[in-house]
Amino acid sequence: MSPTGERAGIRRRGRERGQRRERERRRRRRQEGGERRIPGWQLALRYLLLLAVLALTVGPFLWQLSTSLKGPGEDIYRYPPSLVPHRPTLGNYAGVADIIPVWDFALNSLKVAAANVLTNCVGAALAGYALARLRFRGRGTALVVFIMAMLVPVESIMIAQFVTMRELQLNNTLIGVLLPGCIGAMNVLLMRNAFAGLPYETEEAAFVDGANAWQRFVQIALPSVKGTLAVVAIFAFMGAWDDFLWPLIVLSDQSKFTLTIGLNFLHGTFADNQRLVAAGTVIAVLPLIVMFACLQRYFFRGVGEGAVKG
């Protein structure tokens, strides 16, 4: 048999062993699920708890959406409260755009969030693969450093971050907003766990075929953790889009404000229209909902990828 045929056979046998192990794990899960029967009252209690959690999490957003669609003639403080507007209107959204340049602020937030997603996905994937698959001196120490970085409160290092941005002449720039969060320690650990959960047989077969570390990373490992990449992308986008304190510290030019800072102008000293505040809140939340809706299939798969092994 030629060397090429031998390598193909080794790769095929490695793939078959990985598939057999996966089928065995699924069979065991089905057996365990069939043996554990949940009593009816426990099942009903679980559904009641889920409904309560749903009301606590989705209820405030529905109330904000309802308030944003109510006109000036409707009393938003009435009792009992009315969730459905009697005369829905989109005038509050136009009012937000009249008071602040909301779309310019949203564009700034989108720039920072998109760049944050890119840097976190690339950086966390590279670091996670190195920690999970490569053998080098100090790998355990590096992993401990990433875990310890998650324990440090962000507020305790903001002064040092601001001084660093000022020394680099990046204060009052969107790059200065981006840099401190361009690679998150939690995202690195998520990617590390996802790569560690992959079977070694496929990568070993690629190594026998002569693939180097970059080829194994790009062609074998990375396509297998798309779900965890989606999780990292969602977390990175949400973190950058919702961030308020750091942009407030580092930005001083109104033309560079992000959306979270700009919406603060809707709260006036002598006037506070809750309908406009609710409309601004809905504008800020909609991109997050759209992104999660597009990536939810990969998100739930990625949670399992990053939590099976550590």
Image (cartoon, rainbow, N blue to C red):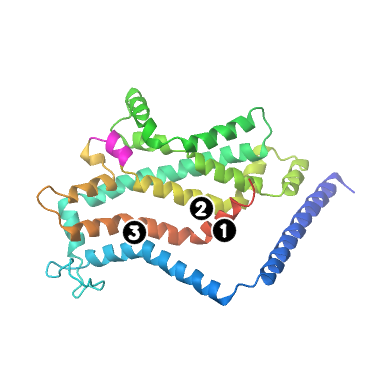
Amino acid at dot 3? Leu
Q: Residue lying at the far left in this picture: please name it.
A: 270
Give the x, y percent position of residue 77. Answer: 18, 66
Residue linked to disc 1: 301
Instruction: Estimate the spatial distance between the alpha carbons at disc 3 and disc 1, rounded to whole Å.
Output: 23 Å
Question: Nearest the camera: 96 or 208?
Answer: 96
Circle 1 SS class = helix
Question: Nearest the camera: 261 or 46?
Answer: 46
**Which quadrant of the view contains residue 211?**
top right
- Residue range highlighted in magenta: 245-252
**Which quadrant of the view contains residue 218?**
top right
Label pair 2/1, CB-CB below 8 angstroms: yes
Instruction: Estimate the spatial distance between the alpha carbons at disc 3 and disc 2, rounded to whole Å.
Output: 18 Å
Residue linked to disc 3: 286
What crowding class fits label 2: few (fewer than 14 Cα within 10 Å), some (14-19), or many (20 or more)?
A: many
Determine the residue positioned at 28% across, 35% down. Answer: 249
